[in-house]
Image (cartoon, rainbow, N blue to C red):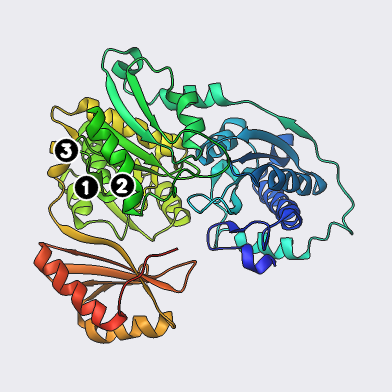
Amino acid sequence: MIGKVFKAYDVRAVYPRPLNEKIAWQVGHASASYLMSEAARAGRLDPMGRTIVVGRDMRTSSPDLRDALVQGMRDAGARVIDLGMVDTSFVYFAINHLDTAGGVQVTASHNAAKYNGFKISGLHARPVGTGSGLEEVKRLAAIADRQRVQPAGGGLESRDLWEEYRDFLLKSLDPTVRSGERQLRVVVDAAGGMGGVMVPKVFGDVPGLEIIPRCFEVNGDFEHEPNPLVDSNLDGVRAAVKEQGADFGVYFDGDADRCMMIDDTGRSIGCDILFAWMADTSLRANGPGAYVYDLRSSRVVREVIEARGGTAIESRVGHVFMKEALRGHQAALGGELSGHFYFRDHFGTDSGPRTLIEICNLVVAAKKKPSECLAGFQRYVSTGEVNFKVEDVDEALKAVDKVFSESETSKLDGVSYDLGDAWFNVRASNTEPLLRLNVEGVDAAARDAAFERIKEILGAPVRAG
């Protein structure tokens, strides 16, 4: 069963089979053993070096999985601080605020409510994923036997850090919004997920923010699919922005670590285009610096960063790689096509609420409407991420390379090809038997011509699960 629940970046599966309380205990025991060991290796022999914070989302299975996880941690000798029902970025904050050995969030992110899982982070909220410790956690979990373990009797306490979290976040918000001097109307769609808990607690009484809520009720399920990459899921917030005459709208995924923007016209904005606006504004204000973007992003991202004298750092897809690049280059910001945005002032981690703050700051600083500002970054046209189901990923990639090998430009993550008037990246999914394709061109004709050539090799696209 253990092998079925460990994925590339976290632990995630359907509850109660294959993921259940027995496995949650094993993961708790293993993750605590690993995190305490790593803290000790870093010289952290103080009590907080044996302390782990735990949060959970609103799924009906989360309390029981949290309890089993925590018991496993305590049986391994860890002291556990229970944060309660919080968004994932809250856990990253708590690890750093309390200076603990690490933390675990009980969540399955954007997956349906029948799923659940665990996101594990180490010292300073560094991610524990494939290549950064998750393999060892998996090994330890596989051999953890509750019947044979002598419980070490680690302690447990509950801690409410919402006030500290709110203060930490809002110090980054434009002071004219905090004071009410500048007013913003913002539609927020929480999809029934953790955004519905976080937004009222963090932004509910900010004088300059009028929050227009959608799907804030938290009942353990989702009012609609909490995946912002499925375009139809954004229909409700797009309509609400236009109906309410809002300055903009945002959409949070299930655990509220991802945030997508809807502009004042009700149009959803690609996260790479939003990141280009973020980077451009930051470089104008702060001067040269490093900015990290995932390799699926529009070519405009690199062009904007370099035109402003910044250093553009291309990264592999995934938060493990993005965070490593952000810290390694001391970058100010990072942006991923999936809606994860990373901030140096948020410990180099991704944060949905911090992204909302950044969008507010952009809108306040601009002399034009968001749609007018964003138009300047939409130089090219793309397909967005398109998925192809294939029987053999390696063979499919070889078939693509046979046709396009003379145009290859990079093998950082999958393979990228430059055709002149169009360019694309194709890479294997980390979780499914899929190839993920992103095509961009100087215009629709160039994009579509390249896309048709690729479809001749890979067949008809499918929607990812």
Vertical comparison of 328 with 184: above or below: below
Q: Amino acid at mark 2?
A: Tyr
**In the rendered image, which residue does mark 2 sit on?**
291
Element marked by disc 2: strand
- Locate residue 438 relative to residue 81 in the image: left or right: left
Element marked by disc 1: helix
284 or 232, which lies in front? Answer: 232
Quadrant for residue 394, please give it.
bottom left
Quote the CA–CA distance across marks 1 and 2. Answer: 7 Å
Graded by Cα atoms within 10 Å as few (under 14), some (14 to 19) or many (20 or more), the crowding at tag 1 reads many
**Callout 1 touching callout 2 (CB < 8 Å):** yes
Q: Amino acid at mark 1?
A: Ile
Q: Amino acid at mark 3?
A: Ser
**In the rendered image, which residue does mark 1 sit on?**
305
**In the rendered image, which residue does mark 3 sit on?**
371
Q: Position of residue 415 (x, y in %)?
A: 32, 73
